[in-house]
């Protein structure tokens, strides 16, 4: 993992698009009085991220990747989570609204058949020409737990690097855990979804 700061930004900026450079310099690395006057607002950054997410039609992309029709995975309603990712090369900051954001945004979908849970995630990168897709599938009998966990991420606070707590959803199986970001989701909805998933898991294990 490499956390991008003002000191190493010039090297990282090579080959980036105008929008990527703008996001990096005017949102994540802008600071002080000049940053307040010329920087990008939290709302504008959120809007740029959401435009990219909406254009991807990730629910359908998820179904295509797992190779199933939605009628085959309707044991309970599909669950979606979204949030800021802190893997690889990234920038992060706490906005004026007090919320943590990073340069990577992950959207995850979970689908439930009679016997298995299917997981799909897609991570967009706002400052690089990269993406990340992942798929997994688990039998209910192999899943130990659904839960939320808190991890630590690096973040810019008044031009300084500090650590910040980030919430993630976890699927626990023997010997391993799969994590996905949930910090951009409505946390009340997240909790309701997780409780519904736990109830289904208990039913399948009876």
Image (cartoon, helix red, strand yellow):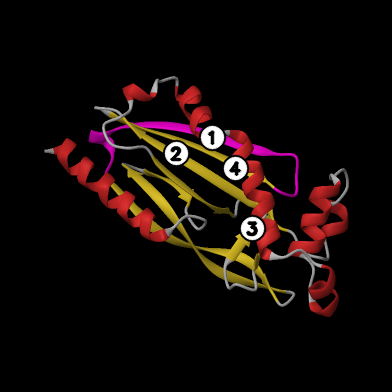
Q: How far, Cα to Cα, is label 1 from label 4?
A: 11 Å
In which image quadrant can residue 35 be found? bottom right
Neighbourhood count class around disc 2 (C-alpha, 10 Å): few under 14, some 14–19, many 20 upward: many
Q: Residue at x 39, y 37 (%)?
A: 110
Q: Where is 112 relative to 199, above or below? A: above
Q: Residue at x 25, y 27 (%)?
A: 115
Neighbourhood count class around disc 4 (C-alpha, 10 Å): few under 14, some 14–19, many 20 upward: many
Q: Which residue is mark 1?
A: 58
Q: Which residue is mark 3?
A: 102
**Marks 2 and 1, the one that precedes in the sequence:** 1
Q: 117 or 96, which is in the foreground?
A: 96
Q: Which residue is mark 2?
A: 109
Q: Where, quadrant-wise, is the C terminus in this rendering?
A: top left
Q: How far, Cα to Cα, is label 2 from label 1?
A: 8 Å
Q: Which mark is residue 123?
A: 4
Q: Is residue 3 magenta?
A: no
Describe the element under mark 1 as helix, strand or loop.
Answer: helix
Q: How far, Cα to Cα, is label 2 from label 4?
A: 12 Å
Q: Of the residues tagged 1 and 4, which is closer to the observer?
A: 1
In which image quadrant can residue 78 be found? top left
Describe the element under mark 4 as helix, strand or loop.
Answer: strand
Q: Position of residue 194 (x, y in %)?
A: 31, 50
User: Which segment did they paint magenta?
Assistant: 126-144
Q: Position of residue 1 (x, y in %)?
A: 65, 53
**Marks 2 and 4, the one that precedes in the sequence:** 2
Q: 26 or 129, which is in the foreground?
A: 26
Describe the element under mark 2 as helix, strand or loop.
Answer: strand
Neighbourhood count class around disc 3 (C-alpha, 10 Å): few under 14, some 14–19, many 20 upward: many
**Marks 1 and 3, the one that precedes in the sequence:** 1
Q: Residue at x 80, y 78 (%)?
A: 32
Q: Position of residue 87 (x, y in %)?
A: 60, 51
């Amino acid at each position: 993992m490499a956390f991008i700061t003002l000191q190493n930004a010039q090297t990282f900026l090579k080959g980036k698009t105008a929008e990527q450079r703008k996001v990096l310099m005017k949102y994540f690395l802008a600071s002080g009085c000049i940053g307040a006057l010329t920087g990008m607002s939290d709302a504008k950054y959120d809007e740029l991220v959401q435009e990219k997410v909406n254009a991807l039609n990730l629910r359908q992309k998820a179904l295509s990747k797992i190779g199933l029709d939605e009628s085959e995975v309707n044991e309970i309603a599909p669950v979606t989570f979204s949030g800021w990712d802190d893997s690889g090369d990234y920038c992060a900051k706490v906005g004026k609204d007090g919320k943590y954001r990073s340069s990577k945004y992950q959207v995850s979908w979970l689908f439930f058949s009679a016997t298995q849970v299917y997981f799909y995630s897609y991570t967009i990168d706002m400052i690089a020409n990269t993406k990340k897709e992942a798929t997994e599938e688990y039998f209910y009998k192999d899943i130990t737990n659904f839960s939320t966990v808190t991890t630590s991420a690096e973040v810019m606070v008044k031009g300084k690097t500090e650590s910040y707590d980030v919430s993630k959803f976890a699927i626990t199986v023997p010997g391993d855990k799969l994590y996905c970001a949930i910090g951009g989701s409505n946390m009340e909805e997240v909790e309701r979804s997780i409780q519904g998933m736990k109830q289904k898991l208990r039913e399948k294990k009876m």
